Amino acid sequence: MNTRTIDLRSDTVTRPDAAMRKAMADAEVGDDVLDRDPTMAALEERVAATLGYDAALWVPSGSMGNLIALMIHLRRGDAFLAPEHAHVLGSELGTAAWLAQGMPQVLPHDAGPGRPTPNSVAAATGAGPYYALATTLLCLENTHNFAGGAVFDVDEWNGLLGAARQANLLVHLDGARVWNAAVALDVQVSDLTRGADTVQVCLSKGLGAPVGSMLASDSSRITEARRIRKMLGGGVRQGGILAAAGLLALDNIDSLACDHANARRLADGLRERGWSVEQPQTNIVLADGPMSVGELATLGIAAVTVTGRTRFVTHRDVSEADIDEALARLGDA
Ligand SMILES: *Cc1c(COP(=O)(O)O)cnc(C)c1O
């Protein structure tokens, strides 16, 4: 039996391909901390334009991008809103609280998986007694990872932005996989990112770069973000080697559609084999089945558990044939 592991733990496992490694090797570089690296500058300019913002900053991880945004937006003791199971709530070691000094307040998924309604934003805000928290920020996540790569569309985005502005909230979008949302909805990425105060996007997930996320905003906030990045130890020198990978990664947006098709194929196959599966909107499949992730591992299928369910993530390093192979192994078992 072929027991090569089919790695569906995350789209972060994607490795740079030969073309990306060559672009990295050939990258023009400078010292980005002293006086900018030209390839970094080119990447930051391209991402800012793609997302519909004045400026963008490369950061080593999405967690750092989110943290810098929260550090810019929050003052000590401010409350911020985020949908249940958001990455900023449970997957960043509480840095939103202990470094950005915010008090988290969870919003329900009352508009559907991963999605709060504008009403629940409004209900969580408004003037209270003098000892109430000041709620100053709304954090949204598109796609919502732990809700199964769930997407909200342009109308919902604008509705939530409207509710936030009505309540005088700043808005940060955790768009780690907003590329997937744009492909799933067949809209421009900027339609799903424009209008916030800050947006964080990942290059190192489905797009296939080895390292890197981007934070986009207006120029003055990005100037401040560059200072905070340095403070957190995230200033890099010849970053062009990483930025070159990021520039190539941006050419991979359209091919996310293959990952989405593979996720649907996997979901259908799991259902045929008796699993209870949520229909995937993007590249993440949440399922309940007769096997634990430990038992899946013995079949050479790597997955993880999130919020009590098994999560499979499709990506550019697993093919349609790999999905069929995984399903065949499950069928035999
Ligand atoms: C992966 C991810 C991040 C950032 O992750 P890093 O591993 O720090 O790059 C942020 N938000 C969401 C929703 C994610 O899935």
Image (cartoon, rainbow, N blue to C red):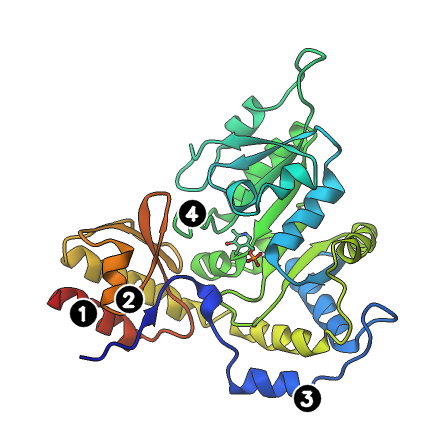
Give the residue at mark 3.
26
Q: Which residue is depicted at the point 64% across and 49% down?
A: 66
Closer to the eye: label 2 or 4:
2
Q: Earlier in the sequence, mark 3 or mark 1?
A: 3
State whether residue 302 is above or below residue 310. Answer: below
Disc 2: which residue: 301
Q: Position of residue 12 (x, y in %)?
A: 48, 65
Secondary structure of the residue carrying numbered label 4? loop
Q: Earlier in the sequence, mark 2 or mark 1?
A: 2
Confirm or deny contact between disc 2 and disc 1 (CB under 8 A): yes
Q: Amino acid at mark 4?
A: Phe
- Binning the other alpha carbons within 10 Å of mark 1 as few (below 14), some (14 to 19) or many (20 upward) gives some
Q: Which residue is mark 1?
A: 329
Q: What numbered label is drawn on residue 272? A: none
Sequence-first tag of 2 and 3: 3
What amino acid does circle 1 point to?
A: Arg
